[in-house]
Image (cartoon, helix red, strand yellow):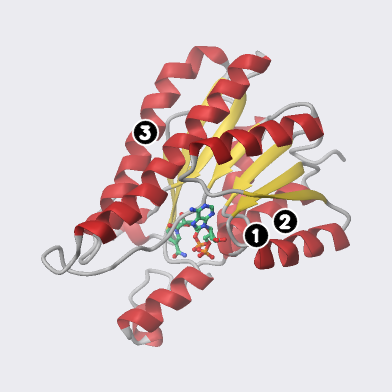
Amino acid sequence: MAGLLEGKTIVITGGSTGIGRATARRCAEEGAAVVIADINKTEAQIACDEIKAAGGNVMFVETDVTDSAAVKAMLEKTVDTHGSLDGAFNNAGIEGAFTNIVKMTEAEFDRTVNVDLKGVWLCIKHEVEQFVAQGTGGSIVSTASVAGLVGARGGSAYCAAKHGVVGLTKSVALEYARKKIRVNAVCPGVIETPMLDRLMTETGLDRAAFENQEPMARFGNPREIAEAVVWLLSEQSSFVTGIAMPVDGGYTAL
Ligand code: NAD
C-alpha cells in the first residue's frame, strides 16, 4: 500500500531534534522525500543517518529560519533537487527566556519572537510563493503550542509568539483557501524533547510532580505530534485549513 505522502517533497524546519526529527522520520516512512532545514548540523547528521538506515529519502540544508535569504535558498535547493515543493512543517523554535515580564529583557523578547514568530512568517511567505509559482497548491503545518491557545506564567514572549503563529496560520489559510493551499498549526502539549529537558533544568521543576499535573499523568512523545502533522500534510485532511489543532493529552480541556 502506498504511503500517505508518497511522491511528495516535504520541508521540515527544526528537523534535527525533538518533534521535527520524529516528524521527518514519519514523513519518510510515509514515502516523502524529506528536507531537514536547521541550524544544528551535528544532530541533523544523526537524524539523516537514522532515516537513511530505515530506507528513507532525506537531505539536510543548513538554514537559519530568521534569515529570509537562507529560507529562500533552502527552498530553491529543495526544488532544484526534487522538482517541486508539496508540503512544509515550520517547526523550528526556541523556548526563549521563561521569566516574569518585569525581569525579561527586551533582547530576550526580541530573540524569542524573531525565531518563533518571524521565522514561521518568513517560511510561510516563501513556501506560499513557491506553491503559487508551481501552480500546484500544497499543505503547510506550523508548530504553535498550547502556549498559542492559553497563557503561561513567565511566557509573555513565548506565548505572544505562539499565539501569533495561530493568527498567522488562520490569516494565510483564508488568503489562499481558493488556491489549493492549506495552512494549519499543531499545538503540542508538554512533549519529551531536548527543549523540555532544558526547561526542566533551568526552572528546577520537579519532573514527577509536573508530569502528575497533566490530565493523562504523562508527557507526550514526539511521535504523537508527528502523527497529527503527517495527517495535516496528507490528502486525508483535504477539507481542513486554518485550524490550530491541540495535541496535548487534554491539557487545554482543563
Ligand atoms: P528542540 O529544541 O528539540 O527542537 C527545536 C529545533 O529547532 C532544533 O533542532 C533547533 O536546532 C532548531 N532551531 C532553533 N532555532 C532555529 C533557527 N533559528 N533556524 C533553524 N532551526 C532552528 O525542541 P522541540 O520541543 O522539538 O521543539 C519543536 C517545536 O515545538 C518548537 O517550535 C517548540 O516551541 C514547539 N513546542 C514544543 C513543546 C514541548 O513541550 N517540547 C510544546 C509545544 C510546542
Question: How far apart in space, not on screen, are marks 1 and 2 (Cα)?
Answer: 5 Å
Please, is residue 239 above or below residue 51 in the view? above
Name which of mark 2 and mark 3 comes first in the sequence.
Answer: 2
Residue at 37% x, 41% y: name it.
Answer: 165
Question: Does mark 2's beta carbon lie closer than 8 Å to ligand 1?
Answer: no
Amino acid type of disc 3?
Answer: Leu
Which of the two labelled residues, at mark 3 and mark 1, occupies the earlier sequence position? 1
Residue at mark 2: 25
Q: Is residue 151 above or below residue 65?
A: below
- Which secondary structure lies at badge 2? helix
Local secondary structure at mark 1: helix
- The amino acid pointed to by label 1 is Ala
Mark 1 and 2 residues: CB-CB less than 8 Å, in contact?
Answer: yes
**Is residue 218 shown to the viewer in this render?**
no
Q: How many marks do you count on the picture?
A: 3
Which residue of the protein is positioned furthest toward the front in this rendering? 69
